[in-house]
Image: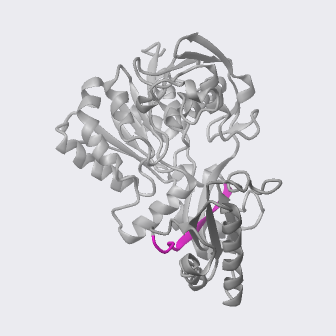
Amino acid sequence: MPERDMIRIASGQGFWGDDLDAPVRQVEGGPIDYLVMDYLAEVTMSIMQKQRARDPEAGYARDFIPLMERIFPACVEGGVRVVTNAGGVNPEGCAEALLDAGRRAGVAGRARVGRVEGDDILERLDALLEEGHELRNMETEEPLESIRDRVQSANVYIGAAPIVEALGQGADVIVTGRSTDTALTYAPMMHEFGWADDDLDRIAAGVVAGHINECGAQSTGGNCLIDWWTLPDMARVGFPIVEARPDGTFTVTKHPGTGGRVDRGTVAEQILYEMGDPTTYITPDVIADFTSIELEEEAPDRVGVRGIRGRPRTDFLKVSIAYADGWKATGTLTYAWPDAAAKARAAGKILRERLDRLGLAFDAVRTELVGWDSTHGPLVGEPPADLPEVQLRVGVRGRDRSAVERFTREIAPLVLTGPPSVTGFAGGRPRVQEIMAYWPALIRREAVEPHLRVHVEEV
């Protein structure tokens, strides 16, 4: 039987670059048992892999370390355990830096750091291909061999088992690589409540709790469509806290006195976020049926969640692969009234003609008028003549870097050789950026899970 009838799992991070003070507010703002922080997205892994290629000690979320140095003492004193995928493509390096941070913070001998490795299969790719794992693109069915020489990163989405193992070994802070966002939340639930691997409905409830937690303040009013102008004190928005119970039911709330709001609307919006088939939300540990979710407003800033059903997991795990796919650059100019849109369109036409004259070949050239057609695409009819200003944004992409670089030199001349009343070029020449494309694939779980490793070490 579980020792506790409820645990509080607080979200402190929705993405790498989120509010740096949110985890501090979660730890200091009231009682919590766990702090979970999600740092990873598909493109993040390739960024971290490139960082590690330049510096073998890099490849993880560096800002996680000073954050933990700041909150480590409060976490230890308050019994708050931290679970995060900040390890990126270098969980070992992240854990080593974390150990040093703990010693600097004065918690030596009072905390244990765990790390989970084995999700990174970049160095195993060729062997896996030879074994018959084609890693076909889930959208195009192309085999990975077609882009193998351009692959930058390859990471498998792993589930709760290694996190549960690390918690069982007494880890107070756990860093993983490409753990699924939701597992950061439901792994503590499985550990605390003793849920078995085949306890499908309860684990599915944990998946829903993790989905609500994973995007930080997006479930407490951030990025909210419903009456967004009525949300109070968003400058001090509270991040979500899941109050989880052994039977799989839970309540979504936030610390008292913080901004934002928790109600049926904010929670439902987050539930629908990034949703495909709502009956089949696939994770490494269970398939959750999101149509079975029942929401109830229990009190102000308290929404109860129950009724969730789950089905057995699949035989496969998802692989997130990033590969180099050419180069891109984007430049902007702002045109003022009168006839702002007409001037911008004329400038775009002139620029395209000059690119053609230079014989530059691109895979794509995109021209947008920010303030008129950039958000929703080309609109019906003509823009009103009295638009006070409009920004011309032109972007190109192609395999030839030299062509993209030449494009960056053709924006500035429009200031004196194109339509009048242009401004906004003070930022200088556009920067050429490498394009990282996403390749989703599946791999049989038995090719990955035996390679997962858990290490726990005292600070």
- The answer, for residue 326, to whether it is visible in the render is yes
Q: Which residues are magenta?
A: 428-442
Image side of residue 326 versus residue 175, left or right: right
Percent x, y of residue 112: 29, 38
Is 433 magenta? The answer is yes
Residue pictured at 53% horizontal, 77% vertical:
412
Q: Residue furthest top?
A: 299
Q: How is the image coloured?
A: one colour
Is 110 magenta? The answer is no
Q: Residue furthest bottom?
A: 358
- The answer, for residue 111, to whether it is visible in the render is no
Percent x, y of residue 333: 57, 67
Percent x, y of residue 405: 55, 81
Q: Residue furthest front?
A: 338
Comparing 65 with 446, the one in front is 65
Comparing 329 with 411, the one in front is 411
Q: Does 409 sit above or below residue 249?
A: below
Comparing 130 with 208, the one in front is 208
Comparing 20 with 37, the one in front is 20
Could you say which quadrant of the image residue 230 lies in? top right
Residue pictured at 23% horizontal, 42% vertical:
102
Could you say which quadrant of the image residue 369 lies in? bottom right
- Which SS type dominates the magenta stretch? strand
